[in-house]
Image: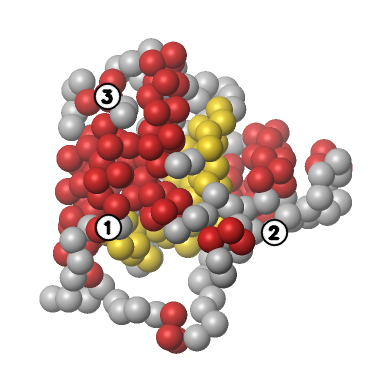
Amino acid sequence: MTPASLPPLLAFGAHPDDIEFGAGGIIALETKAGRPVHFVVCSRGESGTNGTPPQRTAEAEAAASLLGAALEFIDLGGDAHFVPSLAHSLTIAAIIRRVRPSLILAPTVTENQHPDHSILGKIVRNAARLARYGGVAELRATQAHAINALLHYAITSDGEARDTSPVLVDVSAVVPTWTAAMNAHASQAATRDYVELQLTRSRFHGLRAGITHATPLWPADPLVVDSLASLSHTARRF
């Protein structure tokens, strides 16, 4: 498949920095390969300890530009006020139908992390199903769309799924671009070095796989390959 024909990747984040910290290396890989990427950020960090909503909006815009992604903001009730609801899933489903991606990235549904992260993961998971149902009354104005895969990413180690093995994506070649995108969120470095936290986590996962940096993803459903030739190797290196 040529770069011009690559279908879009749609990435959802609860807060202005989530996509960059949790999956920025993957985004850099995909845009480098010519895939269109569209970010949907579902709050402006209104409840955050550091940074104002205007500041965090500007940081997200700068980071998306560095990664070569389009960006839009939507309102799901405000930072720290997310609730799983049909209305929110319908809002997301309408975006899926408009962007028509083949792949979706969303936060993991693992509990005991920022509640917005796991709640958004569930909202997106439900929305991906609703988007493909042609008879949903609230969505009839748009054409149904089925994605190829929903993949969950973790913003921190606390959000990593413990009950299943991840797919590890080699992001070694794009670490400088990924780092620059994370550094664009300067307000979040006031009390904790989130950039080093992410790089350390990616080095750990990379070491498992015999590479320098890797980002884990957890498929919402079993992955299907056309041939075993698609499988590179496993992460068992010790």
Query: Vertical placement of 219 versus 14: above or below?
Result: below
Counting residues from the N terminus, which is met first, the one under dot 2 or under dot 3?
Answer: 2
- Dot 1 alpha-carbon crowd within 10 angstroms: few under 14, some 14 to 19, many 20 or more: few
Residue 46 picture location, percent across and down: 44, 17
- Dot 2 alpha-carbon crowd within 10 angstroms: few under 14, some 14 to 19, many 20 or more: some
Front residue of 51/47: it is 51
Disc 3 marks a residue whose amino acid type is: Ala
Disc 2 marks a residue whose amino acid type is: Ala
Residue 120, label in figure: none
Q: Quadrant of the N terminus?
A: bottom right
Q: Quadrant of residue 226?
A: bottom right
Q: Secondary structure at mark 1?
A: helix
**Residue plotted at (81% across, 50% down):** 143
Residue 173, label in figure: 1
Q: In front: mark 1 or mark 2?
A: 1
Disc 1 marks a residue whose amino acid type is: Ala
Q: Secondary structure at mark 3?
A: helix
Look at mark 2 in the image and give the residue it sits on: 146
Residue 219 picture location, percent across and down: 47, 62
**Residue plotted at (30% across, 63% down):** 170
Q: In front: mark 1 or mark 3?
A: 1
Query: Vertical placement of 47 versus 146: above or below?
Result: above
Front residue of 7/198: it is 7
Labels 1 and 2 touching (C-beta < 8 A): no
Counting residues from the N terminus, which is met first, the one under dot 1 or under dot 2?
Answer: 2
- Can see residue 120? no
Labels 2 and 3 touching (C-beta < 8 A): no
Labels 1 and 3 touching (C-beta < 8 A): no
Most extreme residue toward the left is 238
User: Label 1 vs label 2: CA separation?
Assistant: 31 Å
Look at mark 3 in the image and give the residue it sits on: 186
